[in-house]
Amino acid sequence: MNKRQLSVTLVALLLVLLYACSNDDDPKPHDDSLEKKIGQMLMIGFRGMEVDEHDQIYDDIASGRVGGVVLFDRDVALGFAPRNVESPQQVINLNNQLAQLATEYPLLISVDQEGGRVARLKEEYGFPATVSAEYLGTTNNDDTTRFYSRRIAQTLSGHGFNVNLAPVVDVNINPESPAIGAIERSFSDDPAIVTHHAGIFIDEHHNENLFTALKHFPGHGSATADSHFGLTDVTETWEETELIPYQNLIQMGKADMVMTAHIYNANWDTEYPATMSKNVITGILRNQLGFDGVVISDDMNMGAITDHYGLEEAIFRSIDAGVDILIFANNLVYDELIAIKARDIILDLIEEGAITEARIQESYDRIMLLKGRLGKQVAKNAW
């Protein structure tokens, strides 16, 4: 074969290869990096006091299918059976196992440790006692708030957590609100007091290299129902002052994450609750209040979502609205394959053009920027 024949042959082979690679009929594997970016947008709850290679959560973390986990002391779906918390040493061991599984990206290991009624690390398991936000706001003493906030923060950092899904900055508009005021989760009915004590709480957590999440945006304190169990309509009760703590803390640079509320207000959106509303998340939180950090959903398994929307619609609407991390706490209901299902739904939405890869990149960039603050080693792994 002469040089000319060889050149023609090589060109022909190249054209065949190019055609094969571009043929729309050929199956196109998903971009592995895209799947991992989606994984960073998922925070999952799981069962077990420890994990091993036989557990789904083990594979989810090790494969980069999830970017965060949330621990609970009790499993609601199993009749409040023990879940992830038994003793201080057991929690240390579990969190060490979880952290070590995440070799490419650091894992967000979170818990709801507000103090008072909502505290997963309870005194009965051997952890330090806590007090409620209402107690701190009523006492209204900086030293008292700092003492209990520091105690919570040191408890979490000392046991392997890096995220506290707190503080609640809902203004106590309705003291009988079943999810907030009635169980002492709000600091005060005065937005200035809420801002002040939440700020101290956050500062003490930052001192321990912990992230916090302001909740429940744009304000759950006036609600007359509990979004855990169904649609919560605040159209007639919500007040503009409920935005003040968020606005203040964002302007003060204290907002690591903002957690959405599954509440409905026809004045914001006539179709969707806040978590799924672009008017609320992009319009109010991002554009009006200027927050460009990580937006994290409340539990997507809560009745306000699951009773009214399918999984695909809930995921699509939330991401389209501007939510960066979706929590599937797996506590009210349990599905150990939820991370795989959520990933596949998001990939299908991208394939259909309903969500763009650029939108996934936005959330990924925000999450990586946040994780980069955890420390030099974490930042190196994250980037």
Image (cartoon, rainbow, N blue to C red):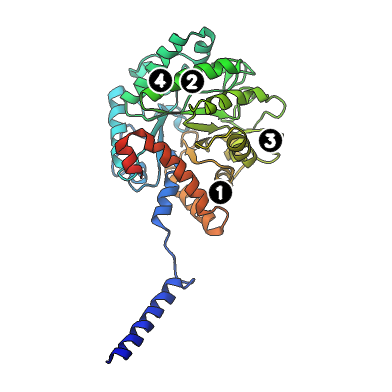
- Gap between marks 4 and 3 measured at Cα: 34 Å
Q: Left or right of 355: which side holds 112? A: left
Q: Quadrant of the C terminus?
A: top left
Q: Residue at x 60, y 23 (%)?
A: 244
Q: How many numbered circles are shown? A: 4
Residue 248: percent from left, percent from top:
56, 24
Residue 287: percent from left, percent from top:
61, 37
At label 4, which amino acid type do we have?
Glu
At label 2, which amino acid type do we have?
Gly
Q: Which mark is residue 204?
A: 4
Q: Residue at x 50, y 53 (%)?
A: 357
Residue 263: percent from left, percent from top:
62, 32
Q: Which residue is mark 1?
A: 312
Residue 348: percent from left, percent from top:
51, 56
Observer-side mark, 1 or 4, equals 4
Q: Which mark is residue 199?
A: 2
* Mark earlier in primary sequence (2, 3): 2
Assess whether mark 1 and mark 3 are in contact (beta carbons under 8 angstroms): no
Secondary structure of residue under mark 4: helix
Observer-side mark, 4 or 3, equals 4
**Nearest to the observer: residue 366 or residue 345:** 366
- Gap between marks 2 and 1 measured at Cα: 36 Å
Q: Residue at x 44, y 32 (%)?
A: 78
At label 1, which amino acid type do we have?
Glu
Q: Which mark is residue 176?
A: none
